[in-house]
Image (cartoon, rainbow, N blue to C red):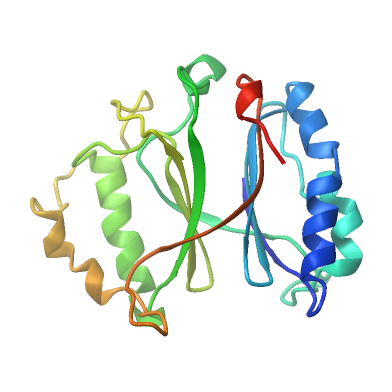
Amino acid sequence: MIYRSQLREGQEEAGLKTMTSGQAARRLVEEGKLMTIAGFRWNRELFLYYECMDGAIHPDEMFGDLAPLLEDWPGHADKRQWIPMVDVFHFNEPVSREHWIRKAPVERRAGRIAHLKPEMMASYIYYHYQLQEERAFLGDKYEIIAMHENLLFGYQEFPKVIEEPAAPRKLTTSGTPENWNDSRMDLHFQPWEDGHLYFKHIELVFEHYCGDEHNERL
């Protein structure tokens, strides 16, 4: 599950304090309902990445106290504060608890964001879905990229774990460029104000993991 929200103007400090002081997320990890959860911040925006093990859990169940501090998002009959982001790329995916549980301590969990040129969003998804399902090359087991509007949020863990996916591939084609640089990802991204292209890392606010207590911190 990957969600995006935005704090009301002037509520950044109160929002971060409320997010980190709540114990609901940690309790769900301890109860075995979540394997991993991490929260990130960029300016007024908040991002959640978490892995459910016992049915879907909505952010409101963990961060209900944040509601007065968050902006309402339009687009649905009922206003929303947490927007689900769409998984547009992953190298691997869980097939069981045993497959997904970390086999070694995680030294660092990271979040990063980038903006696509709106007219290149379809092309980005096209190339990445091919790469993902053709298994053109292997990558980080726990890396995932999600999208909302033209914003990309990426979750990563370090050190990276590189292994053959256990789930069957969904394509038998071979359309991924042999040289990934030929996909011209440089033409897909909207440059930052400082001229940087691609992703920038953002602040980790908190993290919890079910099997690695010494790595949990607030």
Q: Which residue is depicted at the point 82% across and 71% down?
A: 79
Q: How many marks?
A: 0
Residue 62 shown left or right of residue 216 in the figure: right
User: In the rendered image of this protein, does residue 138 appear above or below residue 5?
Assistant: above
Residue nearest the viewer, comparing 160 with 78:
160
Does the image show residue 60? yes
Image position, residue 54 (x, y; %): 72, 26
- Picture quadrant where residue 215 is located: top right
Residue nearest the viewer, comparing 101 with 11:
11
Residue 11 shown left or right of residue 208 in the figure: right
- Picture quadrant where residue 78 is located: bottom right
Image position, residue 95 (x, y; %): 48, 24
Image position, residue 38 (x, y; %): 63, 43
Q: Which residue is depicted at the point 20% across and 39% down?
A: 137
The C terminus lies in which quarter of the figure? Answer: top right
Residue lying farthest to the bottom in this orientation: 193
Residue lying farthest to the top in this orientation: 98
User: In the rendered image of this protein, does residue 36 appear above or below residue 96?
Assistant: below
Residue nearest the viewer, comparing 124 with 14:
14
Residue 29 shown left or right of residue 171 in the figure: right
Q: Which residue is depicted at the point 23% across and 41% down?
A: 134
Does the image show residue 171? no
